[in-house]
Amino acid sequence: MGTGRPIDPLVGLDANRSDAFPLSARPLGFGRNSLQTPRTANVDFGVVKTIQFGEYRHLDLIAQFFNLFNHVSVTAINPFFGTGAVALPTFSQPIEGAIPRQIQFAANFEY
């Protein structure tokens, strides 16, 4: 579990006329890091079954689950407000997420 990350809103052009790169001008009414991604939640789970073959040899059967409940965790939002007084429709909308559910199986024989 985690809180959202702060995001700095931008206008997408050099509104300050500072010739700075990357563009760092913020829209009116927005402070630095005033946007935030939603909270994140992720549950990973693993199971190991060991089967003995004598005193020194054994077989490990492994199952691992990443993002077990397939919870959508947004890792980035669109910070670009636009150049006018009205925000773009995609402003502060999710543009990147964490990995979806993944399942991995393995067998490990040690001798």
Image (cartoon, rainbow, N blue to C red):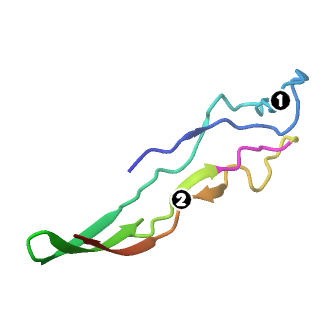
Towards the viewer: 31 or 94: 94
As displayed, is residue 13 above or below residue 20? below
As displayed, is residue 34 above or below residue 108? above
Residue type at mark 2: give it: Ala
As displayed, is residue 85 above or below residue 68? above
Residue type at mark 1: give it: Phe
Coordinates of residue 99 in the picture (x, y in percent): 52, 63
Task: Report whether 6 appears left or right of 8.
Answer: left
Q: Which residues are magenta?
A: 77-82
Towards the viewer: 26 or 28: 26
Dot 1 and dot 2 residues touching (CB under 8 Å): no
Q: Secondary structure at mark 1?
A: loop
How dense is the environment of label 1, judged by Cα within 10 Å: few (below 14), some, or many (20 and up)?
A: few
Residue 81 in magenta stretch: yes
Task: Report whether 18 appears left or right of 24.
Answer: right
Which residue is at 61% across, 34% downward?
Answer: 34
Pointer 2 residue: 98
How dense is the environment of label 2, judged by Cα within 10 Å: few (below 14), some, or many (20 and up)?
A: some
Coordinates of residue 78 in the picture (x, y in percent): 70, 49
Magenta residues: mostly which secondary structure?
Answer: loop
Spatial CA span between label 1 and label 2? 28 Å
Which residue is at 84% across, 41% downward?
Answer: 85
On the rendered image, what quadrant is the C terminus found in? bottom left
Pointer 1 residue: 21
Check residue 35 in the rendering and tell me which mark sits there, or answer none: none
Task: Report whether 30 appears left or right of 98.
Answer: right
